Image (cartoon, rainbow, N blue to C red):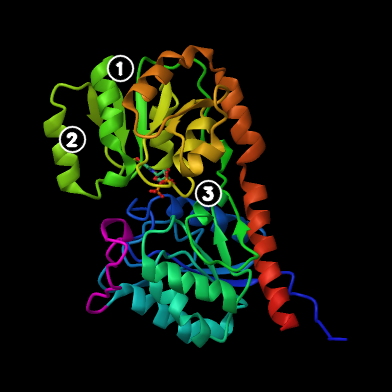
Amino acid sequence: MQNISPLPKRLKLLFVSTPVGGLGTGLGGGVELSLYNIAKYFIEQGHTLQIVAPSGSLWNRDIFNIVEITGNLQIIAQIQERDTPITMPDNSLLANMWEYARSVQNEYDLIVNFAYDWLPFYLTPFFQTPIAHFVSMGSLSNALDTVIAQISKLYPGTIGFYTPSQGATFPSLTPPLYYLSSGIDLSLYQFCAEPKEQLAILGRISPEKGLEDAVAVAAQTNIPLKIMGKIQDQAYWQKIINDYQGAPIEYLGFLPTDKMQQVVRECKALLMAPRWVEAFGNVAIEALACGVPVISYARGGPAEIVKDGKTGFLVEPDSVTGLIDAVKRLDSIDRYECRKQAETEFSLLPLGARFLQWFEDILQRIQRM
Ligand code: UDP
């Protein structure tokens, strides 16, 4: 019989962030919010946590222990083809972040990778400290698929996803796989019962988000659309503006959570028109938390979140007509049901508890090996 020593009650964790942009800039998308919430949970529970992040990260240093790393940003996966070879810029930020992680690894029980990049998976067998990989997007790259499959086989249970529909986009994975969903600090989102005659779309401005379909809805219904988020693809944004001159749209920039929810809560609905399999769609639960129904194409994460006809509508993917029909049916949605769903399914404590369980399972499995 093996002698298994009990796990430490307080874990020493090293979170390694995404190398596509500083924390708080919006360039990292929803994984920034997830990292923020998970980190806060572990700090509040008394665990030791350091975050490795790109220089220029904006988070409050009174709360978070952040080590800033310099180097050139990694190219985002969304703009590459499936068979594009893995590329690294000179003085790679990603490589520098992982070089730092390597140098301090012995001080930690577990390293958690939040980057959607090939390198951390490839490096995993070269580390002595175990690495948990939180995968934040669906499958986009053959090379990344292969290395994720390899790591799931070599180190079972170390791969975590947001949702089963996201996980299903990856081939040849070895179970167990962890589906961690998401969660938010509900106290930051205020309920609004009486919306204005306006719609919202939230998120990075990039082709996979299908912003043009939401703008088409505004143009055809004449209901104003508030657009919030980081412009990641300037040419894409410019084309939408040119194509839809006169549409009642307003771009408000990338807003911090507090300002963003003040706008979203006064909207009749949040529109989501993803072209890809959205891994989760944190914006959906943020809208629900304000009592705002979500109208989304029925694919990926939002299809697992929205209760069709109760907390929003799931419509045929890529159908602008479907979105417009749903907008017309919004009066049948009870906004209290939306807030209730956020409270019962997407609060912060259960999210943190799921991550803790995942980390403990990994450490226990390693002890048994
Ligand atoms: N967001 C924000 N301010 C804005 C627009 C978006 O803070 O003005 C955040 C939003 O809260 C969410 C993230 O951007 O956390 C978008 O995440 P999502 O999971 O919806 O999509 P992703 O970018 O990861 O594909």
How far apart are the two marked residues, 2 and 1, measured between alpha carbons? 17 Å
How far apart are the two marked residues, 3 and 2, measured between alpha carbons? 29 Å
Kind of residue at badge 2: Ile
Name the residue: 48% across, 70% down: 148
Q: Is residue 61 above or below residue 204?
A: below
Q: Taking 43 as reference, is 301 left or right?
A: left
Instruction: Work out whether residue 118 or residue 269 is closer to the camera in this orientation and state it.
Output: 118
Kind of residue at badge 1: Ile
Residue 303 shows which numbered tag? none
Instruction: Work out whether residue 118 or residue 282 is closer to the camera in this orientation and state it.
Output: 118
- The span shown in magenta is 74-91
Secondary structure of residue under mark 2: helix
Residue underneath mark 2:
240
Residue underneath mark 1:
223
Q: Quadrant of residue 362?
A: bottom right
Residue 193 screen position, x and y as percent: 52, 17
Residue underneath mark 3:
165
Q: Taking 63 as reference, is 179 left or right?
A: right
Residue 110 screen position, x and y as percent: 59, 75
Q: Is residue 99 above or below residue 228?
A: below
Q: Nearer the viewer, mark 3 or mark 2?
A: 3
Of the numbered discs 2 and 1, the one sitting upstream in the chain is: 1
